[in-house]
């Protein structure tokens, strides 16, 4: 079991990239969070993090696919993907905490 993360600018970009990732690998989205400052005077785009899980190989493939499709909307330096192989139980539980009800 593994957990994967995709962080990009824009909610639509995140959903598009994860739709493609879910179709290309056997992964399950477990959480969606948004990261943006409360101070709206700064011109900072909405940042979205999507957390997903599956087998180690599927999560790695899903992260690669998500990155590839996120590049259609974001620059390389605006995309973060990471994979945690065999996360501790507590880490896995934290992944299910989400701003969006799944």
Image: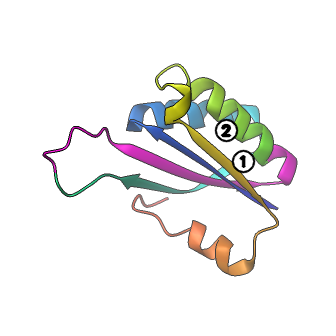
- Please provide percent x and percent y for residue 16: 51, 30
Q: Residue furthest left?
A: 41
* Residue lying furthest right: 57
At a point 26% along the width and 55% down the height, the residue shown is 37
| Residue under numbered circle 1 | 27
Residue lying furthest bottom in this view?
90
Q: Position of residue 32 (x, y in %)?
A: 48, 54
Circle on res. 22: 2
How packed is label 2: few (under 14 Cα within 10 Å), some, or many (20 or more)? Answer: many
The chosen color scheme is rainbow
Left or right: 59 in relation to 56: left
Asked where in the image residue 80 lies, by quadrant, the reply is top right
Residue 5's place in the image compared with 11, above or below, is below
Discs 1, 2 touching: Cβ within 8 Å = yes
Q: Dot 2 lies on which element?
A: helix
- Point out the image quarter for the N terminus: bottom right
Nearer the N terminus, badge 1 or badge 2? 2
Residue 66, picture quadrant: top right
Q: Which residue is at 49% across, 37% downward? A: 14
Indicate whether 82 appears above or below 99: above
SS for dot 1: strand
Percent of width and height locating residue 58: 81, 45
| Closest to the observer, 99 or 77 | 77
Residue visible at 39% across and 38% down in the picture: 11
Separation of residues labelled 1 and 2 (CA atoms): 6 Å
Residues in magenta, as a range: 40-58
Q: Nearer the viewer, residue 77 or 52?
A: 77
* 91 sits left or right of 11 in the view: right
In this picture, residue 65 sits left or right of residue 45: right
**Can you say whether 58 is above or below 74 in the image?**
below
């Amino acid at each position: 079991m593994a957990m994967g993360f995709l962080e990009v600018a824009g909610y639509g970009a995140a959903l598009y990239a994860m739709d493609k990732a879910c179709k290309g690998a056997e992964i399950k989205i477990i959480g969606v969070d948004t990261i943006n400052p409360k101070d709206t005077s700064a011109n900072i785009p909405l940042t979205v993090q999507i957390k997903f899980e599956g087998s180690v190989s599927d999560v790695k493939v899903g992260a690669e696919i998500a990155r590839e499709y996120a590049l259609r909307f974001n620059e390389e330096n605006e995309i973060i993907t990471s994979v945690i192989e065999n996360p501790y139980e507590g880490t896995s539980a934290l992944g299910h905490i989400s701003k969006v009800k799944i």
